[in-house]
Amino acid sequence: MATQKHVTMNDVAKLAGVSLKTVSNVVNDYEFIKDSTRRKVLDAIDELGYAVNVTAKNLRSGRSDIIGLCIPDPQVPYFAKLLSFVIQEAQERGKQVMFSPTGTSSTCCTARSHPWRPV
C-alpha cells in the first residue's frame, strides 16, 4: 500500500511559481495580492489538493478556534437552548464548540476545563 505524500505550501509555491510567503498571503486572505497571482496560487492549491493543517496552525499561534463549554444537563430545555445558541454564534464566527455535561458536580467542569485554554 503506497503512502500519500502530504502536500505542503512549498509544493504549492513551486507549482504556482511564487514564493512561500505569497502562498501564505493567499491562504490567509491577505488583500494586497494581484488577482492573477491569487488565481495561480488557488489553481495550484486545487490541482495539488492542498489543505491547511489546522493543528499545526493552532500550535504555531498558541490559539485554537474551539470554545469549551460546561453545562449541567444538555437535555434540560434551558441548557439545550443555551448550547444551541452558543454553537450557532460560534459557527458564525468560524469557531467550534466542545461541551462537557457536568451533571450536578461543579468540580467536574473545573477538572475537565483544566487542559482547555481560553481562545
Image (spheres, grey):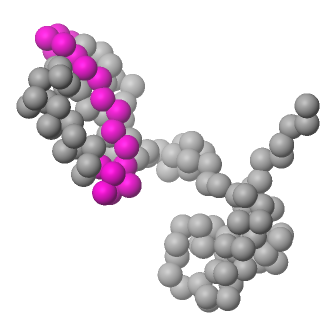
Foreground residue among 36 and 13 = 36
The magenta stretch spans residue 91: yes
Task: Give the side of residue 117 with respect to residue 29, left or right.
Answer: left
Left or right? Give the position of 36 relative to 10: left
* Magenta stretch, residue numbers: 90-107
Residue drawn at 35 percent across, 33 percent down: 98
At 91% from the left and 31% from the top, the residue drawn is: 1
Instruction: Tell me if residue 90 can be seen.
Output: yes
Dividing the picture into quadrants, the one containing residue 4 is: top right
Q: Is residue 10 visible?
A: no
Horizontal and vertical percent position of residue 13: 77, 69
Where is residue 117, by image quadrant? top left
Percent across and percent down for residue 76 are 12, 23
**Looking at the image, residue 1 lies above or below residue 38:** above
Give the residue at x 8% y 31%.
Answer: 78
Residue 90 sits above or below residue 2 on the image: below
